[in-house]
Amino acid sequence: MPNVRDYREGVEVVGQVTYRLANLLGRLLLALWGIRVRSTGTAHLPRSGPVILAMTHVGYLDFVLVEKVAIRRGRFVRFLCRSDIWRPGPLAWAMNRMQHVPVDRMAPAHAYLIARRGLRAGEAVGIFPEAGISYSFTVRALMPGAVALARDTGAAIVPVAIWGSQRIWSVRRPVAGRQPRPELRRGHLVDISFGTPFTVAPDADLNDSTAFLGRRLTELLDSLQRLPEHQPAPGDRAAWQPAHLGGSAPDRVEAAGLDSVPRSAVRPTWGPPVS
């Protein structure tokens, strides 16, 4: 009869195989779409040991894109994702085998405990601290969970900015009270920047440390948004470009009325000034 250790090792093998197959499928789909993924700072992602990836969120495919880069470093990132992804079916089966973590916004403590256990076991955990896509494509209010996990476990936080995925599939300003139909865009460049890791002291203030993370994410995201490859063509109103950079995405004031942000989020003291 197999013991508990054998069972756990078997689950891990099945999970890694499923993860690699899902990653392969994702790469094939990206190739079919003509999506190029370019990454910088990947050396900041350690090849082993506990680490928290705290990522900006601008498009629905962000976790797939980060996953594509992380697996090259030999890391099988356990992403914290919205629980509604776990609808009955093959996707829920695959998410469970890959050990991603469902987050119930009404009761997030369960996901926190699972993530903490994974970090203590030496895993890489991926978190979108904005808890949703920012309509303004700037770093919006942040949940303190990533910083709290770092404080509790001693794991380093690697800030990660993603830009370009918002042109593939993302939120848009509602029309007549409804979200526009998704337009899956082809042939775009996505940039992913891994920033310098930092740790959170056991006695650190969660709000202050979360604000520090907000500033770090903003710096990384702004550096990508200003790259020549991501500038709109002349005359393009560019709904995918932030208002403060000349695009027609909602500015931060309008976005505040569109973003669904939990009350416990730390309000931004970072980012472009609000006019």
Image (tube, rainbow, N blue to C red):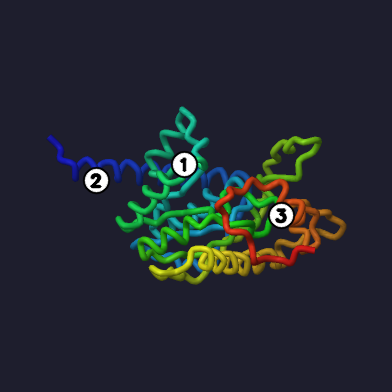
Q: Is residue 273 above or below residue 76?
A: below
The residue lying toward the viewer, choosing from 132 and 69, is 132
Image coordinates for residue 67, horizontal then vertical, percent: 48, 52
Mark 3 or mark 2, which is nearer the start of the sequence? 2
Image coordinates for residue 58, horizontal then vertical, percent: 63, 52
Left or right of residue 87, residue 179 in this image: right
Q: Is residue 162 above or below residue 88?
A: below
Left or right of residue 9, residue 51 in this image: right
Q: Please name the residue shown 51% across and 59% down the image.
A: 54
Please state which amino acid type lies under the numbered disc 1.
Answer: Ala
- Disc 2 to disc 3, C-alpha distance: 44 Å
Q: Residue 107, labelled with which disc?
A: 1
Q: Please name the residue shown 67% across and 42% down the image.
A: 184
Where does label 2 land, which residue? 9
Residue furthest to the top in view is 88
Where does label 3 land, which residue? 136
Mark 2 or mark 1, which is nearer the start of the sequence? 2
Image coordinates for residue 239, horizontal then vertical, percent: 77, 51
Dividing the image into 4 quarters, which one contains the C terminus? bottom right
For the residue carrying disc 3, how many other residues have a C-alpha within 10 Å: few (<14), some (14-19), or many (20+)?
Answer: many
Q: Please name the residue shown 76% across and 45% down the image.
A: 173
